């Protein structure tokens, strides 16, 4: 019986074909842009200036924001925890990696370990309040944590490490992923990390642990009555999300010339919320789609319309909410299910009619 079940399981290609297709498309994208722009494909590998290199930089930001939003979707969209301090997860990774690389002179491998540990510690810090507060109270407590961190990194006493209110500048990046010289390598690195995180998150949601997380989102009291200790499951989700966001922050530090305290503010948590609303809350893939729409729309509207861009961006958000109430991916899935159900009803109608 077990062999029969195992044999009926979809193949790796069937289960992850859209992920593999997306990765191939992402890798091919810079080369396609280079050819369209009149450059040789070798220009991508050599880091030659042009449209291909510019769009790689923009895509890297999209991938990092997608990784960050993916972590928030696990917390809010899957687990049902409303956090107003999620930007702290991202900022801790950004500042910790910057300090380790610049002030402490750590190698990259040690910095990665340090960032993961920092992500684990801050998740445990948030976990302290999990058994005591829920709902909006939890959101306000997390906002309090993030506000304290926002104040600390601007402290003049820590200015030698954090840059105080000016921001952290001049972080040395390993030569092999320096975006000024080897941008395509950084591009591939962010694609790989985002892909691994997405596949891992899908596996979590599809697992028994994911079922409890979804049950917690829908009705925590019922999950408790069924014998599940939801605290440990929520702490698990927070830990995974915290480490993911911290890694996204580390990548942001390697991509940006300056890290400002604003990345720890409420605005960056709101940005993550907007991204998953655009893509579809709880869909996971919607976090990546939403990040692309959010970053590209902000960039090009500001480039084309200047000061009027914020008004247009706001109008675009309203339009998305009105016409795509479940987000881009969520609405597409709902309509696909409705079409499938409609076809099934139509098929059953003709079958009955033929039988009569």
Image (cartoon, grey):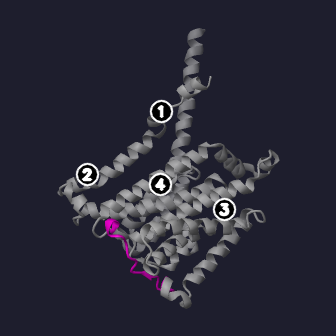
Q: Residue furthest right?
A: 225
Q: Give the secondary structure at mark 2.
A: helix
Q: Residue at the location (66% across, 43% down)?
A: 208
Q: Give the secondary structure at mark 1.
A: loop
Closer to the N terminus: mark 1 or mark 4? 1
Closer to the N terminus: mark 3 or mark 4? 3
What is the CA distance from the residue labelled 3 to the residue labelled 1?
Answer: 36 Å
| Label annotation for residue 32 | 2
Residue bearing mark 4 = 288
Which residue is nearer to you in this view: 347 or 100? Answer: 100
| Label annotation for residue 82 | 3
Q: Residue 334, relative to residue 256: is it above or below?
A: above
What is the CA distance from the residue labelled 1 to the residue labelled 4?
Answer: 24 Å
Residue 21: which quarter of the image?
A: top left
Q: Residue at the location (21% across, 59% down)?
A: 43
Mark 4 surroundings within 10 Å by alpha-carbon count, few (fewer than 14), some (14 through 19), many (20 or more): many
In the rendering, at what x and y percent does residue 11 appear? Answer: 47, 32
């Amino acid at each position: 019986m077990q062999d029969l079940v195992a044999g009926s399981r979809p193949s790796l290609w069937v289960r992850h074909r859209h992920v593999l297709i997306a990765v191939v498309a992402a890798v091919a994208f810079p080369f396609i842009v280079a050819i369209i722009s009149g450059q040789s494909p070798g220009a991508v590998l050599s880091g030659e200036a042009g449209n291909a290199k510019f769009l790689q930089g923009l895509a890297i930001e999209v991938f990092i924001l997608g990784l960050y939003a993916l972590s928030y979707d696990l917390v809010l969209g899957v687990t049902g925890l409303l956090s107003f301090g999620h930007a702290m997860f991202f900022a801790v990774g950004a500042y910790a990696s910057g300090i380790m690389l610049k002030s402490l002179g750590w190698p990259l491998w040690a910095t990665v370990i340090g960032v993961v540990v920092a992500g684990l510690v801050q998740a445990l810090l948030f976990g302290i309040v999990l058994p005591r507060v829920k709902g909006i109270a939890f959101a306000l407590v997390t906002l309090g944590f993030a506000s304290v961190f926002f104040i600390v990194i601007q402290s003049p006493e820590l200015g030698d490490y954090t840059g105080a209110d000016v921001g952290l500048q001049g972080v040395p990046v390993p030569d092999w992923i320096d975006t000024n010289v080897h941008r395509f390598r950084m591009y591939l690195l962010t694609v790989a990390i985002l892909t691994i995180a997405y596949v891992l998150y899908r596996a979590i949601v599809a697992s028994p642990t994911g079922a409890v997380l979804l049950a917690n989102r829908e009705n925590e009291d019922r999950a408790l009555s069924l014998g599940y200790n939801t605290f440990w499951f929520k702490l698990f989700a927070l830990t995974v999300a915290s480490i993911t966001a911290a890694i996204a922050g580390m990548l942001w530090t390697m991509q940006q010339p300056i890290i400002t305290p604003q990345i720890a503010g409420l605005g960056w948590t709101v940005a993550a919320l907007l991204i998953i609303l655009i893509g579809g809350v709880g869909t996971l893939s919607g976090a990546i789609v939403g990040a692309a729409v959010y970053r590209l729309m902000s960039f090009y509207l500001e480039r084309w319309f200047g000061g009027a861009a914020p008004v247009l961006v706001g109008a675009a958000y309203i339009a998305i909410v009105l016409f795509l109430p479940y987000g881009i991916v969520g609405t597409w899935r709902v309509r696909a299910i409705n079409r499938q159900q409609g076809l099934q009803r139509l098929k059953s109608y003709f079958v009955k009619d033929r039988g009569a």
